């Protein structure tokens, strides 16, 4: 992890979300993104797989390392910037999206990434997360969800299942957990996706789509904590995992199962799972990640449940909307252009007509 000191430069990569971020001079390898820091996660932690996948993905992306910025909060996942040979900030609990917003606004030459966890992002950082999403700041948020507090040794988190027995809930949690994709889509995220740590191909696909998107890209990554929540996602890794995983592909009918024996169909204003043989082909939903209709993506998010009988992965939604950072820079440019009009605006605000001298 190094200190940020790169002048503003710009090169269009042909990826909307990375417009203005310079490309590396030649081919890169994953080892070029590997630091000399000892990786300090527990053996078997899903973070290792995610780190290896991200390193390889960044090499394929072809950006200059000095134009990558990873911002993290507090938690096991938040050690991520130490292990990437790029710029990084290990920031404060829950506030990574706020810090990343400042970077995205002031440094359009950077590809800004937030690495956070289910506790960091959805508990103390809940407000920062939803406001970054609604503002549509040009950044990519990776939320590692292991459904437990790992760094502080095993308390229940905002995504832990109802009834979860932990150090802080010895009789079982009575909380109803967040559905993370529903939260993101409720905040009108322009890009929302989910991947599984062990599905390297699926994770790569989602990361590439997230990086290409201009605006806030939200990616939930389901990952295992072998110490405090071991086996929490085993249902998605066993031989019958295909009967649980609903993989989304834009433009394709949503079928799943080892023999595509299940399908997603309309159910009033929502969606439901049905046996493929029991429904007409015309009734099977064809996935449209680019529809402006937010209700459709939200309905997809509601197909996932606590017991993992069904979990939807892939890109739920990817739509275009003006970004917060572009808007702020446009206002600054206007202010600079009309400087004679605005140069005393702050002083006028402080000492305008609506002031009084007391005493």
Image: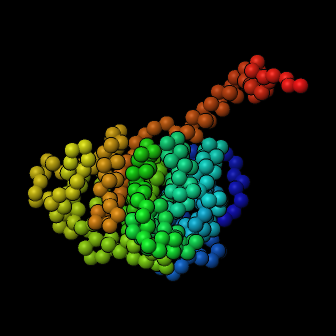
Q: Which residue is rendered at x = 72% and y = 54% of the image?
A: 5
Q: Which residue is rendered at x = 53% and y = 52% of the image?
A: 126
Which x, y percent locates residue 282?
A: 14, 47
Q: Residue furthest right?
A: 359
Q: Residue furthest top?
A: 353
User: On the image, which quarter does residue 81 sit in?
Assistant: bottom right
Q: Is residue 237 left or right of residue 142?
A: left
User: On the image, which quarter does residue 294 sit in?
Assistant: top left
How is the structure coloured here?
rainbow
Q: Which residue is rendered at x = 35% and y = 57% of the image?
A: 314
| Nearer the observer, 27 or 112 | 112
Residue 100 vertical position relative to residue 120 in the rendered view, above or below = above
- Picture quarter with the N terminus: bottom right
- Picture quarter with the C terminus: top right
User: On the image, which quarter does residue 353 sit in?
Assistant: top right
Q: Is residue 162 visible?
A: yes
Residue 286 vertical position relative to residue 157 in the rendered view, above or below = above
Q: Residue furthest front?
A: 171
Which x, y percent locates residue 261?
A: 16, 64
Which x, y percent locates residue 254?
A: 24, 55
How many marks the image carries: the answer is 0
Residue 130 vertical position relative to residue 230 in the rendered view, above or below = above
Q: Is residue 107 visible?
A: no
Q: Is residue 199 left or right of residue 7?
A: left
Q: Is residue 49 left or right of residue 11?
A: left
Q: Which residue is rendered at x = 58% and y = 66% of the image?
A: 75
């Amino acid at each position: 992890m190094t200190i940020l000191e790169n002048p503003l430069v710009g090169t269009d990569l042909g990826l909307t979300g990375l417009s203005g971020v310079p490309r590396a001079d030649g081919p890169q390898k994953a080892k070029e993104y590997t630091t000399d820091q000892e990786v300090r996660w527990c053996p078997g932690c899903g973070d290792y797989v995610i780190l290896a996948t991200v390193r390889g993905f960044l090499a394929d992306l072809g950006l200059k390392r000095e134009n990558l910025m990873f911002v993290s909060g507090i938690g096991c996942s938040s050690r991520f910037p130490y292990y990437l040979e790029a710029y990084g900030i290990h920031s404060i609990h829950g506030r990574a999206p706020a810090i990343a917003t400042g970077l995205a606004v002031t440094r359009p030459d950077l590809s800004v990434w937030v690495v956070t966890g289910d506790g960091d992002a959805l508990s103390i950082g809940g407000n920062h997360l939803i406001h970054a999403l609604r503002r549509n700041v040009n950044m990519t948020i990776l939320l590692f969800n292991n459904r437990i507090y790992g760094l502080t040794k095993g308390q229940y988190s905002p995504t832990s299942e109802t009834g979860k027995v932990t150090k802080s809930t010895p009789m079982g949690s009575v909380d109803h957990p967040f559905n993370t994709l529903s939260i993101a889509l409720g905040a009108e995220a322009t890009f929302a996706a989910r991947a599984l740590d062990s599905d390297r191909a699926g994770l790569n696909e989602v990361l590439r789509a997230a990086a290409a998107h201009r605006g806030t890209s939200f990616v939930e990554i389901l990952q295992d904590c072998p110490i405090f929540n071991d086996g929490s996602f085993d249902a998605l890794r066993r031989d019958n995992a295909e009967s649980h995983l609903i993989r989304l592909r834009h433009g394709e009918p949503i079928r799943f199962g080892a023999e595509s024996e299940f399908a997603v169909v309309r159910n009033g204003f929502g969606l439901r799972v049905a046996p493929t043989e029991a429904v007409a082909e015309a009734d099977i939903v064809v996935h449209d990640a680019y529809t402006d209709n937010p209700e459709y993506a939200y309905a997809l998010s509601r197909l996932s449940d606590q017991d993992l009988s069904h979990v939807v992965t892939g890109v739920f939604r990817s739509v275009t909307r003006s970004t917060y950072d572009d808007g702020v820079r446009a206002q600054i440019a206007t202010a600079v252009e009309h400087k004679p009009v605005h140069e005393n605006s702050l002083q006028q605000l402080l000492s305008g007509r609506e002031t009084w001298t007391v005493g």
